[in-house]
Amino acid sequence: MTHILYVEDDPFSRDVVRMAQRMSPDISGLTVFDDSRDFEHKLLELQPQPDLILLDIHMKPYSGFEMLKMIRSHAEFDRTYVVALTASVMNEEVRMLQEAGFQGGISKPLHLEIFPELIQRIMNGERIWHVW
Amino acid sequence: MDTVNLPITESQPVLSTVDSSAAYETTIAQLKKTIAQLEQQHDDDMVELQAINDEFERAYDEAEQARKDVERANNVKSAFLASMSHELRTPLNAIINFSKFLKKGIPGPLTEEQDQLIGNIADSGQHLLNLINDVLDMSKIESGSLKLYIEPEIDLREIIETATRYTGTLLSDKDVVLQKELPETLPKLMGDRKRLLQVMLNILSNACKFTEHGHIKISAREEKNNIVIAITDTGPGIAADDFKDVFTAFKQTSSGLRQGGSGTGLGMPISQKLVEAHKGRIWFESQLAAGTTFYVELPLQSGLQPERSA
């Protein structure tokens, strides 16, 4: 069972992932942050701790790249998967995600039918770059 | 240029000194004249050379400027496409997925008409997404920046299975059977899994779109160091007049348009480029009112280099 944290400033995108959770029996819980303010503090306070963190990239005040760095600065998240959920899918943009150390990327629009399968594969350690 | 005749003096007797002195004067004068002419010629040549040089430099500057302009225009185009893609994908995420969610009946049951209308929204959103993806791909192909992510061992069986799973839903309202004739094993080959899936999806979704009755059959076989995949449908076929348009960008065949085809006209040209990037070939045979077969041939030894793992 997977507990997901999703950080996203677009309300419709948040709703889409909430819907996807309702269709995915393997996702046991979903916590959503509406913005990246105070991200590090909110993350450390979070109970239960997430198994997988989905990050939007173009966010303020902290971008997905900056949030990834904050996560990786805490040893307790060493085993937490961090995956980008983004509408920026050009080759160059995907390369930047890979170089920054994201363990996968899922493009918007989300592919509702295969989202549960993607989450499962990510949790099995597979590096998914599902750019649709 | 004038030739200068030097007087021969060594063998002349002493008595002829006066004469030879006069000849000497004449020769000197001639030499001076010649030197003056040569100098003039040299000056003229230098002026001409300078002019040629100036012109060359100007042409070089112009070419350099043109190259920079093209580079700048390409960068602007890439930035525009990246931004357009991002800005359109975010609302499409909502349009496509909210409508799919409603259509599944999860929030509540729908009347038949509501189901139909919501299905139309989902399909239109998907169409718009396909269009964006195709325009981005075509732009990458045209600028030569299309990059393949080559994996050393990809399984075409798995790609075909995935493609049939994705496109199977297109046949749910039709009296069409989707058949697979795949050997137990196929040798693995080097390639870009996602791009080869895209080719299969393009061909299969065309077959599903245009075939109203009968069957669509996918087969694969090994043949002389190649794997040949054939996708045969019992659709309306392509008119001979339209053959040339099948792989032309932004062209939809007139027979396809009459059938209510609503593609972007980019799917097959992109597929062709992708197959060629894999050192393979794509072609088709078609007969009106009988059906169409598309073939994709991929070499087992393509010489492609696998990417370092990301």
Image (tube, helix red, strand yellow):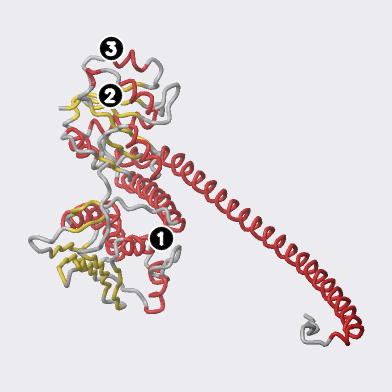
Residue B281, image x and y in percent?
A: 29, 69
SS class of the residue under badge 3?
helix
Residue at the location (66% across, 57% down)? B62
Residue at the location (30% across, 29% down)? A54
SS class of the residue under badge 2?
strand
Tag 3 residue: A45
Residue at the location (27% across, 26% down)? A53
Tag 2 residue: A5
Q: Which sits in the foreground, B261 or B264?
A: B264
Mark 3, chain letter?
A: A
CB-based contact (under 8 Å), mark 1 and mark 3:
no
Whole-number angstrom distance, CA of label 1 to CA of label 3: 50 Å
SS class of the residue under badge 1?
loop
What type is the residue that disc 1 sits on? Leu
Whole-number angstrom distance, CA of label 3 to CA of label 2: 13 Å
What type is the residue that disc 3 sits on? Glu
Q: How many marks can you see?
A: 3
Question: Which image quadrant for residue A123?
Answer: top left
What type is the residue that disc 2 sits on? Leu
Question: Which image quadrant for residue A15?
Answer: top left
**Residue B266: numbered disc:** 1
Q: Residues within 10 Å of mark 1 (few under 14, many from 20)?
A: many
CB-based contact (under 8 Å), mark 3 and mark 2:
no
Q: Is residue B15 left or right of residue A127?
A: right
Q: Nearer the viewer, mark 1 or mark 3?
A: 3
